Amino acid sequence: MTHPTLHPPTDTQWPRWEVFKQDAPGRPHQAVGTVHAGDPDHALLTARSVFVRRPAAVSLWCVREADLLTATPEELSTHPGLLDTPGEASIYQLAIKRTHKRSMTFVDVVGTAEATGPGDALRQAQAAHPDALAWLVFPDAAAVRTDDDPGTVDSWFAPAKEKTYKQQQFYGVIGRHIGELKRAGLMPGRAPTEEQP
Amino acid sequence: MTAATEATLTPAQTAGLIRRLTALADDEIVLAHRGGEWTGHAPILEEDIALANMAQDELGHAGLYLGLRAELDGSDADRLAFFRDADGYTCARFVELPRGDWALTMLRHFLYDTFEALWLEAATRSTYAPLAAVAAKAVREEKFHVQHTALWVERLALGTPESLRRLQAALAELWPHVGQLFQPVDGEAELTQAGLLPDLGAVQARWQDLVARHLHGKCGLTLPALPAEQAPRTVHTSHLAPLLAEMQAVARQHPDAEVW
């Protein structure tokens, strides 16, 4: 008996794209998450649906995961060869993660640099921002971007600004709120412990 | 032509406007429900989110249309949506058909979104100021919907033989019903003449051109012939009643609920 395919391909997913969103003119593009999409146009449309419902945005970029090079200080200390990652000489976008004090792992695009390849771009990002928690670089040409056409801005971004949603509190609670029960003395008190003064 | 307000409409105009706004809202509600049926079932998580978002947008538009109707007759949008039977609904059969596969879903949305975007664009020039304002707001979202669904239709048409086969089959199923979208309601001709509502014939001509250019020109699909006759919007397929039964179940079980 023969096995025509001993190792059939198991990953049938579309490529992953990092989504960069700009909230307002003059603000940096920030990496906000990823989408899977079959091609650049599909990636942008999907990114709009997933990440621009609300709140506001004015521009979106998508970059295929394969075009990104990222590193943390720890990764660079164990894999210094990342700084020699070969690739095309071109303009690169440099981005950094500044803080852990965010609920999302946002990375800010901080500028561009001419580099001989992704490794060189990473080295420049590290030199310019030595205190960053992580660096991310990609060739400028690898980004697919929404255009500045007024029609695009109007139909992709303007509707989100006016969208509101009801906070959970709007719906109230089923039964009575715990605070109300406490005030009415209907909640059992905490069991006395020996640590209490 | 001076701008019309509720106060300057004749009783006949008011009645016609109510019929048109209700037909639009009914199409949106039913199509949104079909879109919502994909929640958790779309081919990929990102598309699940995208389709749910678009369904929400369509429901939002229905809310806008019924809001305009409320200004005319004091009706309640929730009562209209959740307490009318199939007999009382005036949606086109096009949106009632079961959700089918992804090809049918994307094609139906493409055909509908293109119609709605063109109708709304024309409605921004309505002499009835409240409608013009609502159209200006809704048309922006609809233009994005068209981009999304046009992209999917193109990818499926130019994808694999299987995706092309499914798309062509979906076209054969949907096409006989699309004419109902352009069927005037009673009294609509007079409203069009007064500049209150878009000219459906002109909208259809633009729709036909855009749809043919995309489906035939770009995607290589064969467009079936359009049937000459369309059933009125009060005659439904057998699919509408079960859809409404599911959609209205909670509201009808709790008719006195105050918070949705």
Image (tube, rainbow, N blue to C red):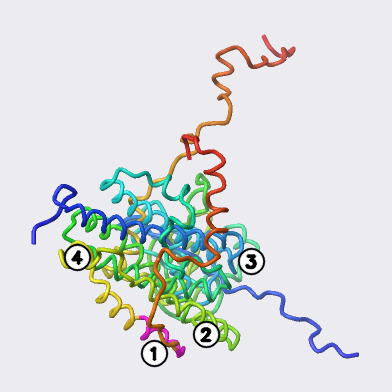
Residue at position x 13%, y 51% in the image: B8
Residue A135 visible? The answer is no
The chain letter for the residue carrying disc 1 is B
Q: x and y percent of residue B155 in the render? A: 50, 81
Closer to us: mark 4 or mark 2? 4
Label 1 – label 3 distance at C-alpha: 52 Å
Closer to us: mark 4 or mark 1? 4
- Which residue type carries mark 3? His
The chain letter for the residue carrying disc 4 is B
Within the image, what quadrant is residue A72 found in? bottom right
According to the picture, the residue beneath numbered tag 4 turns out to be B190
**Same chain for the residues under marks 4 and 3 in the image:** no
Instruction: Answer few, some or many: residues within 10 Å of disc 4's Cα (few below 14, many 20 plus, some between 14 and 19).
Output: some
According to the picture, the residue beneath numbered tag 2 turns out to be B168
Q: Please give the label number shown on residue A79.
A: 3
The image shows residue B81, relative to residue B101, as above or below, that is above
Could you tell me if the residues under marks 2 and 1 are in contact, i.e. CB atoms within 8 Å? no
Left or right of residue A96: residue B190: left
- Which residue type carries mark 4? Glu
Q: x and y percent of residue B173 in the render? A: 51, 79
What's drawn in magenta, residue-wise? B211-222
Could you tell me if the residues under marks 1 and 3 are in contact, i.e. CB atoms within 8 Å? no
B233 or B192: nearer the viewer: B233
**Same chain for the residues under marks 2 and 3 in the image:** no
